Image: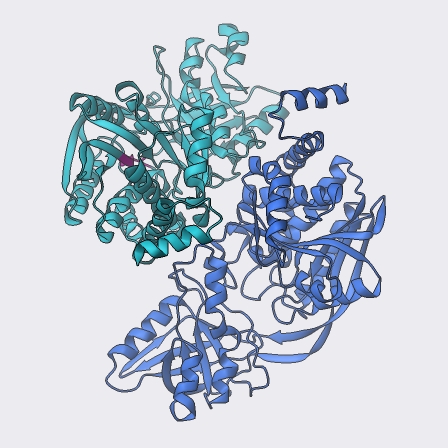
Chain colours: A blue, B cyan
Amino acid sequence: MKFKSILAALIFSAGSFTASAQTDSVYIRKIFDEALVKGECYQNLHYLCKNIGQRLSGSANAHKAVEWTKKLMEDYGFDKVYLQEVSVPHWERGAKEQGYILAGKTKLPVALAALGMSVATPANGVTAEVIELHSLKQLDSLGEAGIKGKIVFFNRPFDERFIEQGTAYGTAGDQRNIGPGAASKYGAVAVIVRSLTSAQNDYPHTGATNYGKNKPIPAAALSTIAANQLSELIRNAKTPVKFFLKTNCRTLPDAVSYNVVGELTGTENAKQVITVGGHLDSWDLAEGAHDDGTGVMQSVEVVRVFKALGYRPKHTIRTVMFMNEENGGRGGAKYAELAAQNKEEHLAAIESDEGGFTPRGFSFDGVNGAFIKNINAAWKSLLEPYEADRLVEGGSGSDIGHLRGTMPSAVLIGFRPDSQRYFDIHHTPNDVFENVNKRELELGAGTMAALVYLIDQHGIKF
Amino acid sequence: MKFKSILAALIFSAGSFTASAQTDSVYIRKIFDEALVKGECYQNLHYLCKNIGQRLSGSANAHKAVEWTKKLMEDYGFDKVYLQEVSVPHWERGAKEQGYILAGKTKLPVALAALGMSVATPANGVTAEVIELHSLKQLDSLGEAGIKGKIVFFNRPFDERFIEQGTAYGTAGDQRNIGPGAASKYGAVAVIVRSLTSAQNDYPHTGATNYGKNKPIPAAALSTIAANQLSELIRNAKTPVKFFLKTNCRTLPDAVSYNVVGELTGTENAKQVITVGGHLDSWDLAEGAHDDGTGVMQSVEVVRVFKALGYRPKHTIRTVMFMNEENGGRGGAKYAELAAQNKEEHLAAIESDEGGFTPRGFSFDGVNGAFIKNINAAWKSLLEPYEADRLVEGGSGSDIGHLRGTMPSAVLIGFRPDSQRYFDIHHTPNDVFENVNKRELELGAGTMAALVYLIDQHGIKF
């Protein structure tokens, strides 16, 4: 009967659907039904956000998150659940930062947050003249004569012409990522950076900075409203505008932490792995809901859905919750190192770290045009009913990116939700559970499970 | 030089891009740059929501909205701006509704809102036994014996398996649209309806009900949390559960109102029209931000963008803000009537009334498979860079739908934003400006302008 109905479907279809595609189509529908009707990732995310909350690497909360997610996967009856020990940086914000603009007689307090890994100001804070720049190149042309003793204010906004907001973030990101180190080289006493967002609001966006080999100087992000105010005051000032900054952060000795791994063991090739993951650590300003509670809870959901459907994978399907994506990437590096040590073969790794928004598709890292053409020909129509069928060349994710070195044959894949809202809340006090939509989250989990299913069934050689 | 570079593009492209497509591609990029970098629809929406607010047909606010939007288009220098008079229903909610569940000794107040066009309860309210139903068919099987004297509680939830939330809304909608009239036929004294949403929260969702020829009885929507509570109390009750409802609404005599129309006059065929619109009226519980402030402000933005770019259309491009979509549809009917009277030819009409969310594409009403195939072949690749390239068969909109009768050759088109969040806030106290994302709104306006441009350049015969 089953064969007959598949045959009938073949005959009556337009001929573009193979029997295998027909089976896949039916199975993917089952995956989505489970994720949308009986989904558990939303309630799991609620627990992670509300009962644990922020979980910066090395913090007590990060440890709680490790313990709870391990238990979660054990309770779901995953075939194997284990931890991968990794030494992580341990940075603390300390007491809330203070900052104000000093322009003539105006003393204007502003919303700001120290950048992750920043050093603290002296106990009395630092006060200095502000110089507004829009690029790191300007540092070189101004040189020590123009920079020394000043607070550098990087204020290049997002370029709104980019459709993908991730690209706007990427092209503005140097100001935060390496701006403080670069300014330090020329004798700046501190750096303040316009928050990396196109939103106009009063939330500061934190995020890691990396001084490289330069002397660390205090660094903080201003809300976009504060950045606009400061820029306007500088533009209209008759005397130099100054800024007062006080940050209280510190870096403690490295701490012991863990990647949390759970798997369904492959029935045919247990040593061949398909990894799906996100990062368990988060910034300390909120609950790490979209960044990246959604990604880790979707990754758990992928395997939960397979278990609920009684699916026995050919290859090992592995949920990985990476530790320390935000300020070190040590968990991703450790995972790649252990994969090589254990002589595992990774068919593919999928990372969800762009928020739990409505799914658009996937991007495939470092593949060629033929791969994109062929994977679209094979699988696009299967994802189209779920409006998650954009299969494009592009980045994957910073955690799985470490596999490039140790597992060059692995296909590295980024889950791509819609990008428009992510940088409204990314790294802010506003990254809370209430800003996650249940349906969007569940559709994302279904989309990820569908791709894992297809890779498990057919491999991913295109 | 220009010709040469187009030629070069032709030679170096994969051959699928014609010279015309190359020109279109460049122009569409200009449209998006204008909408994203210098867009004004977000600030216009802010004014509409915050300085005017709710604007139910016949209300003083609806009149303010007519005056302000007319002035807005005049100030932008549209070639023509005018009003189309239309007589509209004038319903008022009156004082806030009250409702509580009476189960044994429990008296539980619940969040609810009268349905639009509902009649009021007697001044003391109505108290009666509740009967929970999941379909209108159940009314017929229970008959007068089972229904008479009771309050009918329709509690069929959204079917979560639908990917498009509009479909879930459509298939649950009979409970609100015609449920009260159908229950009245069997002697029900009132109807309470589960809010039409998949969200679990405490916002009641209003919306129009139509009694048809049945005797009007009071009708209200319960929040989904209240509906779940009521259902559980009924399930566990030892004695019949009762409900108290008090609504204070009334229907006044019809009022005079207007569609607001603005246009860029066509340089080649002024009598050939491309319409783009949304509805200006809104429900009274909030600001009508997504429903449909976003649609009308995007429709104004389409023409503003063309003016900013100095684009002179071949055909007349017309922004239409329809009045009375929510509880009568009289503005849409009047527009279609006048179009026929004036012997205009409508090439196409596009309606944006599914919220200002990230764009996905367009649906084309009543077209055949060949049309969809050909329009995709011609235009999909032009919209793909904006991730708004889903060109599918489907509904268009209830306002432009009236053109079907008077302008059968017009192609009726629905703008399709992502559907996942719309019914979280649709018709609720939560439909406020703060829930609109600037980028999503602007991308939608750009997408609509791009399609209008393509139709103006090439017609829409596929």
Residue B187 screen position, x and y as percent: 43, 10
Judge left or right: residue A224 versus residue A340.
Answer: left
Judge left or right: residue B143 versus residue A409.
Answer: left
In the image, residue A187 sits, relative to residue B383, either above or below, namely: below
Q: Which of these two is toward me, B358 or A35?
A: B358
In the image, residue B111 sits, relative to residue A292, either above or below, namely: above
Residue visible at 45% across and 58% down in the picture? A424
Task: Indicate the quadrant where residue A43 lies.
Answer: top right
Residue B59 screen position, x and y as percent: 22, 34
Q: Which of these two is toward me, A88 or B379?
A: B379
Q: Which of these two is toward me, B305 or A373?
A: A373
Question: What stretch of residues is rendered in magenta?
Answer: B275-284
Task: Indicate the quadrant where residue A387 lies.
Answer: top right
Residue A177 screen position, x and y as percent: 53, 74
Task: Indicate the quadrant where residue B364 lies.
Answer: top left
Residue A144 screen position, x and y as percent: 43, 92
Q: Is residue B21 visible?
A: yes
In the image, residue A31 sits, relative to residue B17, either above or below, namely: above
Q: Where does the C terminus of chain B fall, quadrant-wise?
A: top left
Residue B283 part of the magenta-drawn span: yes
Q: Which of these two is toward me, B65 or B322?
A: B322
Judge left or right: residue A318 versus residue B209.
Answer: right
Q: Is residue B417 visible?
A: no
